[in-house]
Image (cartoon, rainbow, N blue to C red):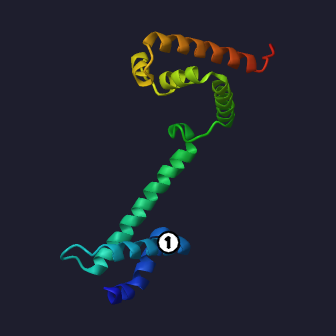
Amino acid sequence: MHEQLTVLLPGLRRFAYSLTGAMAEADDLLQGTVERLLRRAPPEGVGLDRWAFRVCRNLWIDECRARKVRQDAAGHPELSEGQVVDGERATTSQIELGQVDAALAKLPEGQREIITLVAVQGMSYQDVSETLEIPKGTVMSRLARARAALSESLNRDEPARTQP
């Protein structure tokens, strides 16, 4: 197969060039074709030459489709939701997360545990009660105190807003 492939390479390269119109792209397409040919044998009853040209053509079609998708995404960023980063929003979120972390760190351990289990882990009051082996009423009162302390801390640390 290696000998047959060596004989086919000049013709495959010309074919790749006819598809791409640029030598650098043709060489990339040829390399992809050869890699694919070395990984997979031709189907039963199909000659290596026919198979090689078909693989090359299919790789080129795949590349053209991928380019179209990339161009559409670049031309219409709203179509690729979540891929465009809003720097201001990301920075604001990072600052807010830091403030919440700092406020959580100020809470007593019992309150911090409960608010983390309820608000972050999504556990029910009953599950927290069973997990920490404390009464459900204690969970509820600690959670209320933790929420109040967080709210106070976050509102106190919030920079003063100026009215226009």
Rendered image quadrant of residue 53: bottom left
Left or right of 62 in this view: 105: right
In the image, is residue 138 above or below residue 69?
Answer: above
Q: Position of residue 107 (x, y in %)?
A: 63, 22
- The residue located at (49%, 72%) in the rendering is 28
Name the foreground residue: 161 vs 123: 123
Q: Position of residue 38 (x, y in %)?
A: 35, 77
In the image, is residue 137 above or below residue 88?
Answer: above
Q: Residue furthest front?
A: 133
Name the foreground residue: 140 vs 54: 140
Q: Circle 1 sits on which residue?
A: 28
Rendered image quadrant of residue 115: top right
Q: Could you tell me which quadrant the C terminus lies in?
A: top right
- The residue located at (34%, 86%) in the rendering is 2
Amino acid type, mark 1: Asp
Left or right of 25 in this view: 7: left
Q: Could you tell me which quadrant the N terminus lies in?
A: bottom left
Q: Position of residue 148 (x, y in %)?
A: 62, 12
- The residue located at (28%, 80%) in the rendering is 48
In the image, is residue 77 above or below residue 153?
Answer: below
**Circle 1 — which element?**
helix
Left or right of 52 in this view: 25: right
